[in-house]
Protein backbone atom coordinates (compact mmCIF):
# COMPACT_ATOMS: atom_id res chain seq x y z
CA UNK A 1 0.00 0.00 0.00
CA UNK A 2 1.54 3.30 -1.01
CA UNK A 3 1.40 6.46 1.07
CA UNK A 4 -1.63 8.66 0.41
CA UNK A 5 -1.41 12.36 -0.41
CA UNK A 6 -4.75 14.18 -0.28
CA UNK A 7 -5.10 17.66 -1.74
CA UNK A 8 -8.15 19.83 -1.16
CA UNK A 9 -8.84 23.55 -1.05
CA UNK A 10 -9.30 23.51 2.73
CA UNK A 11 -7.44 21.22 5.09
CA UNK A 12 -9.12 20.12 8.33
CA UNK A 13 -6.03 20.44 10.52
CA UNK A 14 -7.04 18.91 13.87
CA UNK A 15 -6.87 21.54 16.61
CA UNK A 16 -7.67 20.89 20.24
CA UNK A 17 -10.96 22.37 21.37
CA UNK A 18 -12.62 22.42 17.94
CA UNK A 19 -15.49 20.06 17.07
CA UNK A 20 -14.56 16.79 15.33
CA UNK A 21 -14.33 16.90 11.54
CA UNK A 22 -17.22 15.73 9.31
CA UNK A 23 -17.57 12.22 7.86
CA UNK A 24 -15.53 12.89 4.77
CA UNK A 25 -12.54 14.21 6.68
CA UNK A 26 -12.79 11.29 9.09
CA UNK A 27 -12.75 8.77 6.23
CA UNK A 28 -9.85 10.44 4.43
CA UNK A 29 -7.72 10.90 7.50
CA UNK A 30 -8.53 7.30 8.48
CA UNK A 31 -7.16 6.11 5.14
CA UNK A 32 -4.08 8.28 5.64
CA UNK A 33 -3.48 7.00 9.15
CA UNK A 34 -3.60 3.41 7.87
CA UNK A 35 -0.94 3.93 5.21
CA UNK A 36 0.81 7.14 6.23
CA UNK A 37 -0.25 10.34 4.62
CA UNK A 38 -0.02 13.98 3.81
CA UNK A 39 -2.95 16.40 3.51
CA UNK A 40 -2.15 19.53 1.52
CA UNK A 41 -4.13 22.72 0.79
CA UNK A 42 -4.99 26.28 1.73
CA UNK A 43 -4.63 27.18 5.41
CA UNK A 44 -7.77 29.34 5.49
CA UNK A 45 -5.54 32.36 6.23
CA UNK A 46 -4.45 35.26 4.07
CA UNK A 47 -0.92 36.55 3.71
CA UNK A 48 -0.17 40.07 4.91
CA UNK A 49 0.04 42.53 1.98
CA UNK A 50 3.51 42.68 0.39
CA UNK A 51 4.50 39.36 1.98
CA UNK A 52 5.46 37.86 -1.39
CA UNK A 53 4.62 34.28 -2.33
CA UNK A 54 4.93 31.53 0.28
CA UNK A 55 8.09 29.47 -0.26
CA UNK A 56 7.06 26.36 1.63
CA UNK A 57 3.99 24.81 3.15
CA UNK A 58 3.60 24.92 6.93
CA UNK A 59 3.71 21.40 8.35
CA UNK A 60 2.01 19.87 11.39
CA UNK A 61 1.86 16.22 12.43
CA UNK A 62 -1.02 14.45 14.08
CA UNK A 63 -1.50 10.70 14.51
CA UNK A 64 0.79 9.74 11.65
CA UNK A 65 -0.66 12.28 9.21
CA UNK A 66 1.23 15.37 8.07
CA UNK A 67 -0.90 18.44 7.39
CA UNK A 68 0.74 20.88 4.98
CA UNK A 69 -0.95 24.25 4.55
CA UNK A 70 -0.25 27.35 2.53
CA UNK A 71 -1.41 30.93 3.17
CA UNK A 72 -2.72 32.76 0.11
CA UNK A 73 -2.68 36.45 -0.76
CA UNK A 74 -5.96 38.41 -0.86
CA UNK A 75 -5.56 38.75 -4.60
CA UNK A 76 -5.01 35.03 -5.17
CA UNK A 77 -8.05 34.24 -3.06
CA UNK A 78 -10.22 36.78 -4.86
CA UNK A 79 -9.28 35.46 -8.27
CA UNK A 80 -8.90 31.72 -7.66
CA UNK A 81 -11.44 31.07 -4.92
CA UNK A 82 -14.17 33.72 -4.86
CA UNK A 83 -13.68 34.42 -8.58
CA UNK A 84 -13.10 31.49 -10.89
CA UNK A 85 -14.06 28.68 -8.49
CA UNK A 86 -17.15 30.17 -6.88
CA UNK A 87 -18.44 32.60 -9.50
CA UNK A 88 -17.74 30.54 -12.59
CA UNK A 89 -17.28 26.82 -11.93
CA UNK A 90 -19.74 26.49 -9.04
CA UNK A 91 -22.76 28.10 -10.78
CA UNK A 92 -21.96 26.59 -14.18
CA UNK A 93 -21.51 23.06 -12.87
CA UNK A 94 -24.83 23.50 -11.03
CA UNK A 95 -26.47 24.35 -14.36
CA UNK A 96 -26.74 28.08 -13.54
CA UNK A 97 -25.32 29.73 -16.65
CA UNK A 98 -27.23 32.88 -15.71
CA UNK A 99 -25.13 33.36 -12.56
CA UNK A 100 -21.68 32.79 -14.06
CA UNK A 101 -19.07 35.46 -14.36
CA UNK A 102 -16.06 34.66 -16.49
CA UNK A 103 -13.04 36.93 -16.43
CA UNK A 104 -9.55 36.26 -17.67
CA UNK A 105 -8.17 37.82 -14.50
CA UNK A 106 -9.98 35.18 -12.41
CA UNK A 107 -8.91 32.38 -14.74
CA UNK A 108 -5.29 33.51 -14.52
CA UNK A 109 -5.58 33.50 -10.71
CA UNK A 110 -7.01 29.98 -10.80
CA UNK A 111 -4.03 28.73 -12.77
CA UNK A 112 -1.59 30.77 -10.66
CA UNK A 113 -2.77 29.13 -7.43
CA UNK A 114 -2.84 25.64 -8.94
CA UNK A 115 0.71 26.18 -10.15
CA UNK A 116 1.78 27.52 -6.76
CA UNK A 117 0.25 24.50 -5.04
CA UNK A 118 2.01 22.11 -7.41
CA UNK A 119 5.39 23.78 -6.78
CA UNK A 120 4.93 23.70 -2.99
CA UNK A 121 3.56 20.17 -2.96
CA UNK A 122 6.12 18.55 -5.29
CA UNK A 123 9.00 18.57 -2.75
CA UNK A 124 6.76 16.69 -0.29
CA UNK A 125 5.93 13.84 -2.67
CA UNK A 126 7.76 10.49 -2.74
CA UNK A 127 8.00 8.44 -5.94
CA UNK A 128 5.35 5.86 -5.10
CA UNK A 129 2.82 8.07 -3.26
CA UNK A 130 -0.76 7.94 -4.53
CA UNK A 131 -2.18 11.46 -4.89
CA UNK A 132 -5.90 12.14 -4.50
CA UNK A 133 -7.07 15.63 -5.46
CA UNK A 134 -10.51 16.92 -4.46
CA UNK A 135 -12.95 19.19 -6.17
CA UNK A 136 -13.39 21.93 -8.71
CA UNK A 137 -10.88 24.34 -7.19
CA UNK A 138 -8.00 22.07 -8.17
CA UNK A 139 -8.81 20.52 -11.56
CA UNK A 140 -5.48 21.61 -13.18
CA UNK A 141 -3.30 20.35 -10.32
CA UNK A 142 -2.30 17.02 -11.91
CA UNK A 143 -1.37 18.70 -15.19
CA UNK A 144 0.75 21.21 -13.25
CA UNK A 145 2.46 18.41 -11.31
CA UNK A 146 3.04 16.38 -14.49
CA UNK A 147 4.58 19.42 -16.18
CA UNK A 148 7.36 19.34 -13.56
CA UNK A 149 7.96 15.64 -13.96
CA UNK A 150 5.68 14.08 -11.35
CA UNK A 151 4.83 10.54 -12.50
CA UNK A 152 2.79 9.38 -9.51
CA UNK A 153 -0.65 7.82 -9.69
CA UNK A 154 -3.12 10.66 -9.42
CA UNK A 155 -6.85 10.60 -8.85
CA UNK A 156 -9.42 13.37 -8.89
CA UNK A 157 -12.86 13.39 -7.32
CA UNK A 158 -15.46 15.98 -8.30
CA UNK A 159 -17.89 16.56 -5.43
CA UNK A 160 -20.25 18.70 -7.53
CA UNK A 161 -22.14 17.73 -10.71
CA UNK A 162 -20.38 17.41 -14.07
CA UNK A 163 -22.77 19.21 -16.43
CA UNK A 164 -23.86 18.12 -19.91
CA UNK A 165 -21.78 19.41 -22.85
CA UNK A 166 -24.23 22.15 -23.87
CA UNK A 167 -23.67 23.71 -20.47
CA UNK A 168 -19.98 22.88 -20.05
CA UNK A 169 -19.12 24.50 -23.37
CA UNK A 170 -20.38 27.84 -22.01
CA UNK A 171 -17.05 27.85 -20.21
CA UNK A 172 -14.63 29.56 -22.62
CA UNK A 173 -11.77 27.30 -21.48
CA UNK A 174 -13.81 24.07 -21.36
CA UNK A 175 -11.32 22.29 -23.62
CA UNK A 176 -8.48 23.01 -21.17
CA UNK A 177 -10.55 21.87 -18.23
CA UNK A 178 -11.25 18.49 -19.78
CA UNK A 179 -7.65 18.19 -20.96
CA UNK A 180 -6.59 18.79 -17.35
CA UNK A 181 -8.90 16.00 -16.19
CA UNK A 182 -7.14 13.68 -18.62
CA UNK A 183 -3.87 14.21 -16.71
CA UNK A 184 -5.29 12.06 -13.87
CA UNK A 185 -5.33 8.26 -13.84
CA UNK A 186 -8.72 8.01 -12.14
CA UNK A 187 -11.52 10.58 -12.27
CA UNK A 188 -14.42 10.00 -9.90
CA UNK A 189 -17.86 11.57 -10.26
CA UNK A 190 -20.83 11.30 -7.92
CA UNK A 191 -23.34 9.55 -10.19
CA UNK A 192 -23.60 7.64 -13.48
CA UNK A 193 -25.31 10.73 -14.95
CA UNK A 194 -22.10 12.72 -14.49
CA UNK A 195 -20.10 9.95 -16.19
CA UNK A 196 -22.61 9.96 -19.04
CA UNK A 197 -22.21 13.74 -19.41
CA UNK A 198 -18.44 13.30 -19.58
CA UNK A 199 -18.80 10.54 -22.18
CA UNK A 200 -21.09 12.66 -24.35
CA UNK A 201 -18.65 15.56 -24.16
CA UNK A 202 -15.70 13.36 -25.18
CA UNK A 203 -17.66 11.98 -28.12
CA UNK A 204 -19.04 15.29 -29.35
CA UNK A 205 -15.77 17.15 -29.08
CA UNK A 206 -13.97 14.22 -30.74
CA UNK A 207 -11.18 14.11 -28.16
CA UNK A 208 -11.24 10.41 -27.39
CA UNK A 209 -13.37 7.31 -26.87
CA UNK A 210 -14.51 4.80 -24.33
CA UNK A 211 -12.64 1.48 -24.23
CA UNK A 212 -14.46 -1.85 -23.95
CA UNK A 213 -13.25 -2.17 -20.32
CA UNK A 214 -15.08 1.07 -19.45
CA UNK A 215 -12.02 3.31 -19.24
CA UNK A 216 -11.59 6.32 -21.52
CA UNK A 217 -8.83 7.38 -23.83
CA UNK A 218 -8.83 11.18 -23.80
CA UNK A 219 -6.17 13.22 -25.60
CA UNK A 220 -4.17 10.00 -25.90
CA UNK A 221 -4.14 9.19 -22.15
CA UNK A 222 -6.04 6.30 -20.60
CA UNK A 223 -8.21 7.40 -17.67
CA UNK A 224 -10.63 5.47 -15.51
CA UNK A 225 -13.76 7.61 -15.16
CA UNK A 226 -16.40 6.19 -12.85
CA UNK A 227 -19.12 7.04 -10.39
CA UNK A 228 -18.22 6.72 -6.71
CA UNK A 229 -21.19 8.19 -4.81
CA UNK A 230 -20.06 9.82 -1.57
CA UNK A 231 -21.61 8.35 1.54
CA UNK A 232 -21.77 9.26 5.21
CA UNK A 233 -20.72 7.42 8.38
CA UNK A 234 -24.13 5.76 8.38
CA UNK A 235 -23.97 3.54 11.45
CA UNK A 236 -22.26 6.18 13.57
CA UNK A 237 -24.81 8.80 12.54
CA UNK A 238 -27.68 6.41 13.29
CA UNK A 239 -26.23 5.73 16.76
CA UNK A 240 -25.74 9.43 17.45
CA UNK A 241 -29.35 10.12 16.38
CA UNK A 242 -30.73 7.40 18.63
CA UNK A 243 -28.78 8.79 21.58
CA UNK A 244 -29.73 12.39 20.81
CA UNK A 245 -33.25 12.18 22.13
CA UNK A 246 -31.65 13.24 25.39
CA UNK A 247 -29.92 16.26 23.82
CA UNK A 248 -31.06 19.48 25.54
CA UNK A 249 -31.67 21.44 22.33
CA UNK A 250 -33.65 18.58 20.83
CA UNK A 251 -35.74 18.26 24.00
CA UNK A 252 -36.49 21.99 24.10
CA UNK A 253 -37.43 21.99 20.43
CA UNK A 254 -39.76 19.03 20.89
CA UNK A 255 -41.44 20.69 23.87
CA UNK A 256 -41.93 23.88 21.88
CA UNK A 257 -43.63 21.94 19.08
CA UNK A 258 -46.17 20.19 21.28
CA UNK A 259 -47.96 17.56 19.19
CA UNK A 260 -47.32 19.34 15.88
CA UNK A 261 -45.53 17.37 13.18
CA UNK A 262 -42.04 18.63 12.35
CA UNK A 263 -40.96 19.24 8.76
CA UNK A 264 -37.22 19.92 8.52
CA UNK A 265 -34.86 21.44 5.96
CA UNK A 266 -31.11 21.79 6.57
CA UNK A 267 -28.94 23.48 3.94
CA UNK A 268 -26.24 26.07 3.57
CA UNK A 269 -27.74 29.25 2.17
CA UNK A 270 -26.89 28.53 -1.47
CA UNK A 271 -28.92 29.10 -4.64
CA UNK A 272 -28.34 25.48 -5.69
CA UNK A 273 -30.36 24.26 -2.71
CA UNK A 274 -33.75 25.52 -3.93
CA UNK A 275 -34.65 27.07 -0.57
CA UNK A 276 -36.87 29.82 -2.00
CA UNK A 277 -38.78 27.33 -4.19
CA UNK A 278 -39.17 25.04 -1.18
CA UNK A 279 -40.58 27.80 1.01
CA UNK A 280 -43.00 28.70 -1.79
CA UNK A 281 -44.06 25.05 -1.98
CA UNK A 282 -44.73 25.11 1.77
CA UNK A 283 -46.80 28.27 1.31
CA UNK A 284 -48.83 26.61 -1.46
CA UNK A 285 -49.29 23.54 0.74
CA UNK A 286 -50.73 25.73 3.53
CA UNK A 287 -53.07 27.37 1.03
CA UNK A 288 -54.26 24.10 -0.53
CA UNK A 289 -54.36 22.00 2.65
CA UNK A 290 -55.73 24.33 5.31
CA UNK A 291 -56.45 21.40 7.65
CA UNK A 292 -52.67 21.20 8.27
CA UNK A 293 -52.50 24.79 9.50
CA UNK A 294 -51.62 24.75 13.18
CA UNK A 295 -50.76 21.03 12.99
CA UNK A 296 -47.25 21.15 11.52
CA UNK A 297 -44.17 23.35 11.79
CA UNK A 298 -41.47 23.73 9.17
CA UNK A 299 -37.98 24.28 10.59
CA UNK A 300 -35.45 25.49 8.03
CA UNK A 301 -31.91 25.59 9.44
CA UNK A 302 -29.71 27.55 7.10
CA UNK A 303 -26.30 28.95 7.96
CA UNK A 304 -25.16 31.76 5.70
CA UNK A 305 -22.31 30.94 3.32
CA UNK A 306 -20.01 32.65 0.82
CA UNK A 307 -20.91 36.18 1.86
CA UNK A 308 -18.15 37.44 -0.46
CA UNK A 309 -20.18 36.47 -3.55
CA UNK A 310 -22.94 39.03 -4.32
CA UNK A 311 -25.53 36.49 -5.55
CA UNK A 312 -25.62 35.05 -2.04
CA UNK A 313 -26.59 38.37 -0.46
CA UNK A 314 -29.44 38.76 -2.98
CA UNK A 315 -30.69 35.27 -2.22
CA UNK A 316 -30.48 35.90 1.50
CA UNK A 317 -32.85 38.86 1.10
CA UNK A 318 -35.20 36.86 -1.08
CA UNK A 319 -35.47 33.92 1.32
CA UNK A 320 -35.85 36.16 4.39
CA UNK A 321 -38.60 38.08 2.55
CA UNK A 322 -40.49 34.90 1.69
CA UNK A 323 -40.19 33.59 5.24
CA UNK A 324 -41.57 36.85 6.60
CA UNK A 325 -44.46 36.80 4.12
CA UNK A 326 -45.53 33.28 5.04
CA UNK A 327 -45.37 33.93 8.74
CA UNK A 328 -47.19 37.23 8.33
CA UNK A 329 -49.96 35.56 6.33
CA UNK A 330 -50.49 32.30 8.19
CA UNK A 331 -49.26 32.74 11.77
CA UNK A 332 -51.72 32.55 14.64
CA UNK A 333 -51.12 34.00 18.08
CA UNK A 334 -49.99 30.55 19.23
CA UNK A 335 -48.53 29.12 16.00
CA UNK A 336 -45.75 30.12 13.60
CA UNK A 337 -45.69 27.95 10.46
CA UNK A 338 -42.04 28.51 9.53
CA UNK A 339 -39.03 28.77 11.79
CA UNK A 340 -36.21 30.11 9.66
CA UNK A 341 -32.91 29.91 11.52
CA UNK A 342 -29.59 31.23 10.14
CA UNK A 343 -27.17 29.23 12.25
CA UNK A 344 -25.29 25.99 12.42
CA UNK A 345 -26.40 23.29 14.81
CA UNK A 346 -24.08 20.73 16.42
CA UNK A 347 -24.05 17.26 14.91
CA UNK A 348 -25.78 15.57 17.86
CA UNK A 349 -28.65 18.04 17.95
CA UNK A 350 -28.98 17.92 14.18
CA UNK A 351 -29.20 14.12 14.23
CA UNK A 352 -31.84 14.27 16.97
CA UNK A 353 -33.90 16.85 15.06
CA UNK A 354 -33.80 14.76 11.86
CA UNK A 355 -35.00 11.79 13.89
CA UNK A 356 -37.88 13.70 15.41
CA UNK A 357 -39.01 15.13 12.04
CA UNK A 358 -41.87 13.47 10.19
CA UNK A 359 -40.73 14.93 6.85
CA UNK A 360 -37.25 15.86 5.56
CA UNK A 361 -37.30 18.38 2.71
CA UNK A 362 -34.22 18.03 0.52
CA UNK A 363 -35.10 19.79 -2.70
CA UNK A 364 -32.02 21.24 -4.38
CA UNK A 365 -32.36 22.55 -7.93
CA UNK A 366 -29.10 20.69 -8.59
CA UNK A 367 -26.69 18.95 -6.23
CA UNK A 368 -23.68 16.70 -6.73
CA UNK A 369 -24.87 14.32 -4.01
CA UNK A 370 -26.49 15.98 -0.97
CA UNK A 371 -25.38 14.46 2.29
CA UNK A 372 -28.29 15.91 4.27
CA UNK A 373 -30.57 13.42 2.46
CA UNK A 374 -28.42 10.52 3.65
CA UNK A 375 -28.10 11.92 7.17
CA UNK A 376 -31.87 12.27 7.41
CA UNK A 377 -32.35 8.61 6.42
CA UNK A 378 -29.61 7.39 8.77
CA UNK A 379 -31.14 9.27 11.71
CA UNK A 380 -34.65 7.78 11.53
CA UNK A 381 -36.26 5.57 14.14
CA UNK A 382 -36.83 2.20 12.38
CA UNK A 383 -40.14 1.80 14.23
CA UNK A 384 -41.48 5.20 13.21
CA UNK A 385 -39.42 6.58 10.34
CA UNK A 386 -39.99 9.96 8.73
CA UNK A 387 -40.42 10.53 4.99
CA UNK A 388 -37.67 11.91 2.76
CA UNK A 389 -38.92 14.29 0.09
CA UNK A 390 -36.02 14.42 -2.35
CA UNK A 391 -35.33 16.43 -5.48
CA UNK A 392 -34.83 14.32 -8.57
CA UNK A 393 -31.93 16.67 -9.32
CA UNK A 394 -29.88 15.68 -6.27
CA UNK A 395 -27.19 13.07 -6.91
CA UNK A 396 -28.61 11.17 -3.93
CA UNK A 397 -31.78 10.48 -5.96
CA UNK A 398 -29.87 7.91 -8.01
CA UNK A 399 -29.48 5.83 -4.83
CA UNK A 400 -32.39 6.66 -2.52
CA UNK A 401 -35.23 4.94 -4.31
CA UNK A 402 -37.47 4.93 -1.24
CA UNK A 403 -37.72 8.73 -1.19
CA UNK A 404 -40.70 10.65 -2.51
CA UNK A 405 -39.04 12.15 -5.55
CA UNK A 406 -40.02 15.66 -6.48
CA UNK A 407 -39.26 18.28 -9.10
CA UNK A 408 -38.39 21.43 -7.14
CA UNK A 409 -39.31 23.69 -10.08
CA UNK A 410 -42.85 22.34 -9.80
CA UNK A 411 -44.00 24.27 -6.73
CA UNK A 412 -47.56 22.88 -6.82
CA UNK A 413 -46.28 19.32 -7.24
CA UNK A 414 -43.88 19.73 -4.31
CA UNK A 415 -46.73 21.17 -2.20
CA UNK A 416 -48.77 18.04 -3.00
CA UNK A 417 -45.82 15.84 -2.03
CA UNK A 418 -45.54 17.57 1.36
CA UNK A 419 -49.19 16.68 2.06
CA UNK A 420 -48.63 13.12 0.87
CA UNK A 421 -45.56 12.75 3.09
CA UNK A 422 -47.41 14.03 6.15
CA UNK A 423 -50.29 11.63 5.51
CA UNK A 424 -48.18 8.58 4.67
CA UNK A 425 -49.17 5.45 6.65
CA UNK A 426 -46.62 3.80 8.93
CA UNK A 427 -46.23 0.63 6.84
CA UNK A 428 -45.34 2.58 3.70
CA UNK A 429 -42.95 4.78 5.66
CA UNK A 430 -41.17 1.70 7.00
CA UNK A 431 -40.94 0.04 3.58
CA UNK A 432 -39.53 3.11 1.92
CA UNK A 433 -37.10 3.82 4.72
CA UNK A 434 -35.66 0.32 5.11
CA UNK A 435 -34.54 0.02 1.48
CA UNK A 436 -32.82 3.40 1.70
CA UNK A 437 -31.16 2.59 5.01
CA UNK A 438 -29.78 -0.71 3.70
CA UNK A 439 -28.34 1.07 0.72
CA UNK A 440 -26.54 3.78 2.69
CA UNK A 441 -25.35 1.28 5.29
CA UNK A 442 -23.52 -0.66 2.60
CA UNK A 443 -22.41 2.31 0.52
CA UNK A 444 -21.13 4.49 3.33
CA UNK A 445 -18.21 6.89 3.32
CA UNK A 446 -15.73 4.10 4.10
CA UNK A 447 -16.93 2.24 0.97
CA UNK A 448 -16.49 5.40 -1.09
CA UNK A 449 -12.95 5.97 0.13
CA UNK A 450 -11.95 2.32 -0.26
CA UNK A 451 -13.37 1.89 -3.75
CA UNK A 452 -11.77 5.07 -5.09
CA UNK A 453 -8.39 4.16 -3.60
CA UNK A 454 -8.63 0.58 -4.91
CA UNK A 455 -9.21 1.96 -8.39
CA UNK A 456 -6.31 4.38 -8.03
CA UNK A 457 -3.90 1.75 -6.76
CA UNK A 458 -4.85 -0.71 -9.46
CA UNK A 459 -4.09 1.76 -12.23
CA UNK A 460 -0.57 1.64 -13.53
CA UNK A 461 1.63 4.57 -12.62
CA UNK A 462 1.42 7.31 -15.24
CA UNK A 463 3.22 6.42 -18.47
CA UNK A 464 6.12 8.67 -19.46
CA UNK A 465 4.24 10.64 -22.13
CA UNK A 466 2.03 12.03 -19.37
CA UNK A 467 4.61 14.72 -18.68
CA UNK A 468 3.70 16.40 -21.95
CA UNK A 469 0.12 17.18 -20.94
P1 LIG B 1 -23.01 21.05 0.64
O1 LIG B 1 -21.72 20.28 0.74
O2 LIG B 1 -23.29 21.62 -0.71
O3 LIG B 1 -23.17 22.09 1.71
P2 LIG B 1 -24.28 18.56 1.55
O4 LIG B 1 -25.72 18.29 1.86
O5 LIG B 1 -23.63 17.52 0.71
O6 LIG B 1 -24.20 20.01 0.91
O7 LIG B 1 -23.45 18.63 2.92
C1 LIG B 1 -23.79 19.58 3.89
C2 LIG B 1 -23.20 19.17 5.23
O8 LIG B 1 -23.25 20.31 6.09
C3 LIG B 1 -24.00 18.07 5.92
O9 LIG B 1 -23.13 17.20 6.58
C4 LIG B 1 -24.87 18.83 6.90
O10 LIG B 1 -25.16 18.12 8.08
C5 LIG B 1 -24.02 20.04 7.23
N1 LIG B 1 -24.91 21.19 7.53
C6 LIG B 1 -25.68 21.87 6.68
N2 LIG B 1 -26.39 22.83 7.34
C7 LIG B 1 -26.04 22.74 8.63
C8 LIG B 1 -26.40 23.45 9.82
N3 LIG B 1 -27.30 24.43 9.81
N4 LIG B 1 -25.84 23.08 10.98
C9 LIG B 1 -24.94 22.07 11.00
N5 LIG B 1 -24.54 21.37 9.93
C10 LIG B 1 -25.08 21.70 8.76
Image: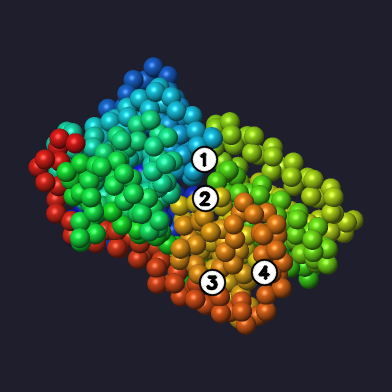
Whether residue 279 is visible here, answered yes or no, is yes
Residue 377: image location, x then y, percent: 54, 68
Secondary element at tag 2: loop
| C-alpha gap between disc 3 and disc 4 | 12 Å
Secondary element at tag 3: loop
Q: Quadrant of the N terminus?
A: bottom left
Q: Which residue is mark 2?
A: 366
Of label 4 and label 2, which has the lower sequence position?
2
Q: Is mark 1 within 8 Å of ligand 1?
A: no
Query: Could you tell me which residue is drawn at 20 percent across and 56 percent down?
Result: 211
Of label 2 and label 3, which has the lower sequence position?
2
Q: Which residue is mark 1?
A: 96
| C-alpha gap between disc 1 and disc 4 | 29 Å
Of label 3 and label 4, which has the lower sequence position?
3
Q: Which residue is mark 3?
A: 402
**Front-most of 324 and 39?**
324
Residue 185: image location, x then y, percent: 22, 50
**Front-most of 378 and 162?**
162
**Labelled disc at residue 132:** none
Q: Is residue 285 left or right of residue 455?
A: right
C-beta proximity under 8 Å, tags 2 and 3: no
| C-alpha gap between disc 3 and disc 1 | 28 Å
**Front-most of 247 and 433?**
433
Q: Is residue 455 above or below residue 343?
A: below
Q: Quadrant of residue 293?
A: bottom right
Of label 2 and label 1, which has the lower sequence position?
1
C-beta proximity under 8 Å, tags 2 and 1: yes
Q: Which residue is mark 4?
A: 421
Amino acid sequence: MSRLVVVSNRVPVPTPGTPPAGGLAVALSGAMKARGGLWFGWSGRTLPPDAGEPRAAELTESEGVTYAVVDLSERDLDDYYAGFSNRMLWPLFHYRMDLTEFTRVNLAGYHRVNRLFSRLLAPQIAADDAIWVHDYHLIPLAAELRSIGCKNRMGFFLHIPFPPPDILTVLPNHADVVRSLAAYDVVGFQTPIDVENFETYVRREKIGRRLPDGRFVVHGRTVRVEAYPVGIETQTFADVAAASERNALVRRTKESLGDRKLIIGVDRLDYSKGIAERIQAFETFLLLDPEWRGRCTYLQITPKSRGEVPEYAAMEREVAGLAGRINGTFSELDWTPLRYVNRTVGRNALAGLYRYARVGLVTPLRDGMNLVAKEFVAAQDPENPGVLLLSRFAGAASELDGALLTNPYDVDGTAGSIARALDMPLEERKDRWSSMFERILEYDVAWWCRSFLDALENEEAAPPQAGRI
